[in-house]
Image (spheres, coloured by chain):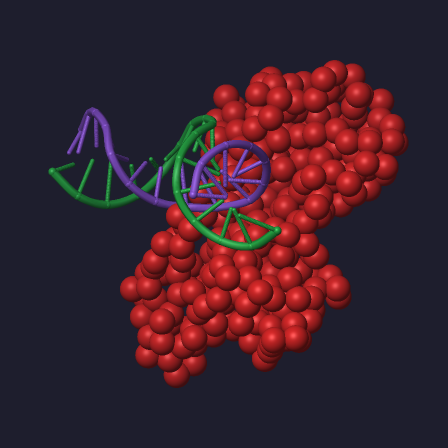
Chain colours: A red, B green, C purple
Amino acid sequence: MPELPEVETVRRGLAPAMERASFLAVQAHREDLRWPLPANFARRLVGASVEALRRRAKYLLADLSSGEVLVMHLGMSGSFRVLDGAAEHAPGALHFARSRSLAHDHVVFRMSSGATVTFNDPRRFGFMLLVPRAELEKHPLMRIGPEPLDRAFTPASLAWACAGKATSLKAALLDQKVVAGLGNIYVCEALNRARLSPRRRASTLATRNGAPTPHAERLVAAIKAVLEDAIAAGGSSLRDHRRTDGELGSFQHKFRVYDRESGRCPTRGCPGIVRRVTQNGRSTFFCPVCQK
DNA sequence: AGTCGAGCCTGCTGGC
DNA sequence: TGCCAGCAGGCTCGAC
């Protein structure tokens, strides 16, 4: 499930293949991803080079020499794989090729770097867009909150964003306008690290005048820590996420509560048992003893 | 305006 | 063993 750490892992894998390389050929085997591919997709890419490959929240952004930005989203089941002359014979690549149905290879980029970059997405919740660079900031998809790993994401900014919110803390953290890039897994993990209940009102992160409470301090630290740990582990591989070389991420082995229903809470000295409840139609995993 | 649920899509899992 | 309902998840849209 690609959340911020998985997308960042993918970005790091794609960068050597795509940055400062141009598109030699673009094949679209399927146009109907979450949204149809842009008109004249291949024609607008071929010949352009990628000046930088960035990430914003869960979006990959390729700045093109044509003045457009290629926006790519992995949806829920999207993955990229990179093959070049050397990687083709690597064990990981072989395993990767076997593990993915070629029927779901929707878009293939042949790059001047020698790499072939293939986008595979069984569920087709992913998408690709082309947006003029000058319009990117105004694009509705980019109207989202701060990057959680940026210095601008602070207890004060989170408290401000949550002030007056009647919804649960869990729902607020999943709201990309509050903070951008978190999904179900890392919200559950961060709340356990911060020992805060997912069911508490979001507004309790702020005092009456909007200043951050100690809860906000703990939560921001926990969010940053869990994301950094997950990126260092190459993300979490549950069903879908893989690195671009086919290797699995390993952070799923370090989950404290996610998908650990009935397990012992890992908080030191806590006798609690992890529970699963449903909030806003999604599973929440948490410890009712230490998460208050 | 803020909040919540449905729907998109496919593959895997678990219960019968 | 085989079948199928249920679930997973990010994001948008419509309803309240």
Closer-to-camera residue (B12/A37): A37
- Residue A94: name its quadrant: top right
Residue A56 visible here: yes
- Residue A214: name its quadrant: bottom right
Depicted A45 relative to depicted A251: above or below = above
Closer-to-camera residue (A13/A40): A40
Which residue lies at the image location 36% right of the left edge and 54% below the top edge? A278
Whole-percent x and y of residue A201?
A: 48, 66
Which residue lies at the image location 62% right of the left edge and 57% below the top edge? A178
The C terminus of chain A lies in which quarter of the figure? bottom left
Which residue lies at the image location 79% right of the left edge and 34% below the top edge? A69
Whole-percent x and y of residue A154?
A: 69, 69
Residue A251 visible here: no
Depicted A245 relative to depicted A285: above or below = above
Depicted A282 relative to depicted C11: above or below = below
Q: How many marks?
A: 0
Closer-to-camera residue (C7/A145): A145
Q: Is residue A196 left or right of residue A177?
A: left
Q: Is residue A205 left or right of residue A57?
A: left
Whole-percent x and y of residue A199?
A: 43, 65
Closer-to-camera residue (A17/A44): A44
Q: Is residue A49 left or right of residue A149?
A: right
Which residue lies at the image location 33% right of the left edge and 64% below the top edge? A275
Question: Which residue is outermost to the bottom?
Answer: A269
Whole-percent x and y of residue A67?
A: 87, 31
